[in-house]
Amino acid sequence: MTLLLMAFVCVGLHAQTKTDLPNVTLKDLNGKDVNISKLSNNGNPIVLTFWATWCGPCIKEHNALNDVYQDWQDETGVKIYAVSIDDSRSTAKVKPTVEGKGWEFNILLDVNSDLKRAMNVSNPPHTFLFDGSGKLVYQHTGYFEGAEEDLYEEILKIATKK
Amino acid sequence: MRKHILFVLALALTVSFRASAQSFLENSQVSGSFQTDAQYYMRDNGIGINDLYGKKLGINGFGKVNYTNGNFSAGVRFEAFLPEMNGFRSELNGVGLANFFATYDNGFIGMTVGDIYDQFGSGLVFRTYEEWSLGMDNSLRGARVVLRPAQGVTLKGVYGRQRFFWYPYLERDMGAEEYRGIVRGVDAEWDLNQSIPSMNDAKFKMSLGGSFVSKKQEDLSLFYYIPENVGAAATRINLGYGNWAFSTEYAYKINDPSAINNFIYKEGRAILSSLSYSQKGFGAVLQVKRVDNMSFKSMYTGKQNDLDINFIPPINYTHTHSLPSMYTYSTQPNGEMAAQLQVNYTIPKGTALGGKYGTKLAFNMSQVNDIVRDSVMENGHMVINKPGSLGYTSKFFAISDHRFFRDINFEIDKKINKDWHVTAQYINLYYDIETIEGHAGAPVVQANIGFLDVTYKINKKQSLRLELQGLWENEVHKGYEYEESEKKDYQKRGDWAFALLEYTITPHWSFSIADKWNYGNPVEEYRDHYFTGTISYIHEATRVMLSAGRQSEGVVCVGGVCRTVPASSGVTLTVSTSF
């Protein structure tokens, strides 16, 4: 029995943890369905960042990202998807908050926390970086002042490979 | 011999998996997360902790693993409360496999067996979710089917029994205290813009939805006739035109006597509407809500948040700073009328007030009052809310003078230059602590609250952050006359000051010290300092946080659901990671 289990463990280990974009469907701010596994950016990097209207550090991170987003796009072609985990008490506030703060990212609504669970996010902010083929290359939890620079270094690593 | 067979079998399995299912393996993904929160408690006579009652340590931990392969996914979550930390429900004490699921979803049909998290519309009749920081999990153990027969059309069906701490998922052989019913629900949603090709990119947007949920429970009451089937239905519509959006959901529930509504046989209703306008640099949203006898649980004896089938969202602003979040509103399921208005505006870059980076302004106002209840005839007498009666009648638009809560706040967020960033907020608060927290006889909290949050970037990697906060209560003054027996009502009351200094080295380290001081408590012996020091280390998706000091008595709220945290003194360690 032990051996059998061991064999399965072997099989399990052979299953490379090639972390991909999960098969979860969310809505964008226009109510359109967006399947996360089908996100693409012409082979350029994709950033997924989890946030909520009630999360202070997330707002700071997004304000900081928004200030540099245009430059990043010009230089690397990166696309940022900001996934709101606001539930029904604050989903109605997401669009006015995003527009009011002038953020330029693509916003997705994870009202039922489906993507949050699938990607094992415990607390926002939590940021994931995928390369052009959808492979996870970097993730970071929490936000400290200036942390966007570290994210950008990671983006540059995969963007120059192209 | 048996061992040999197994070995060969295992080998064969390994080989066959390797050879014939190479692509299968390549598509396999394993991911997961893990978190442990541990608290070591110490005696602290200064804040009234003279006895630990034998509990020196509290540990909450979970580990989860998810496996996905194309359209298939499965996962398990293991939880351990050894024992639970102070402030969490004692029923959590225990260790076990709390949650498992397996899902197949090919886009047309999706099936899940196991523990289900889902919601219909905004959740007024059905929402199961998990909130680790509250020790809250009302997942449904059973089955779910999701059908998408046409573009823009989603049909859902769920069936099962909800999680109730560690109680087994059984129907019988239990006392009334632990009994819970079966929950069944269906939901349909039709998005016209995705469904009708000519509307795909139309300026006008519309989607419709409807749901029906019922619980089947056994009547174990000796005093009342408990209905064994209770149905609830909801209907919703979302409309959009250009920058405008409107959505509303209306829910109705048949009579459902329970411990929460004082065993009255009245139907329940709730409505939640929002209207918003947004364009680049400006956003506004107005929300209104009416709740009337809408607690819906799969156990009629349930208390607090036990076995909630539905979720009635509070719509007020969620504060995150220490003093502003000290008095957080939580939904009153028996009745409330609520409204909130939020406006966000960014003064554009390059203008006199906007400066180089723009200036972000936010205004929010929310208020909640009680509904008006009129008496009903019961055996020739007029009664209100009498157990066993029809309870009361309530006019839909009538608002009671009894105000539960009001919050008016204004925030300014300004990046001054590359190095300095300032956020400041002023809050005017009215909080009926007697209703919201059940502190009978305690005077209403009326307070002015302000904070200033300043960040200074020393260089590319290092920064300093200072938070200064104050809470000033208008009504509860120093030297207030109180009876000795009323003293407890004034715990945590009166004026507060808070200061925090944080030093961060990006991307790994953060060091902070903070002091929260109840300097203006009417009761002199409650004028305590709550000093804490915290170190946290973050590496990619791993976070380790160690803090030591005092924690004041208070309420922790996430998603409008709250738990009270007793005062404590000691050391807290949090380790979390995901992979």
Image (spheres, coloured by chain):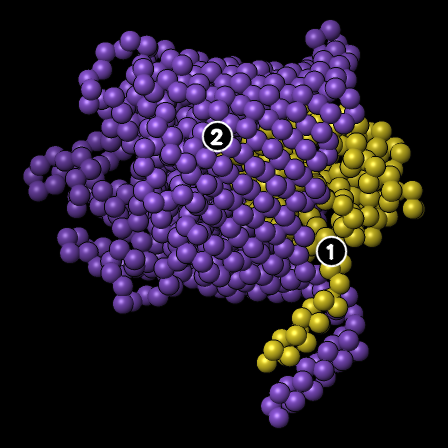
Chain colours: A yellow, B purple
- Residue B487 appears in view: yes
Q: Is residue B174 left or right of residue B539?
A: left
Instruction: Give coordinates of residue B364: x percent, y percent.
Output: 52, 21
Q: Is residue B479 left or right of residue B278?
A: left
Q: Residue at x 30, y 21 (%)?
A: B490
Q: Which chain is home to disc 1?
A: A
Q: Quadrant of the N terminus of chain B?
A: bottom right
Q: Residues within 10 Å of mark 2 (few under 14, many from 20)?
A: many
Q: Which mark is residue B549?
A: 2
Above or below residue B397? Residue A33 is below
Instruction: Give coordinates of residue B411: x percent, y percent.
Output: 57, 17
Callouts 2 and 1 in the same chain: no
Q: Nearer the viewer, residue A57 or B313?
A: A57
Judging by the rendered image, the residue that carries numbered circle 1 is A19
- As drawn, which residue projects farthest toward the top? B352
The count of marks equals 2
Element on which disc 1 rests: loop
- Amino acid on which the number 1 mark rests in the picture: Thr
Q: Residue at x 69, y 48 (%)?
A: A34
Instruction: Give coordinates of residue A114: x percent, y percent.
Output: 59, 50
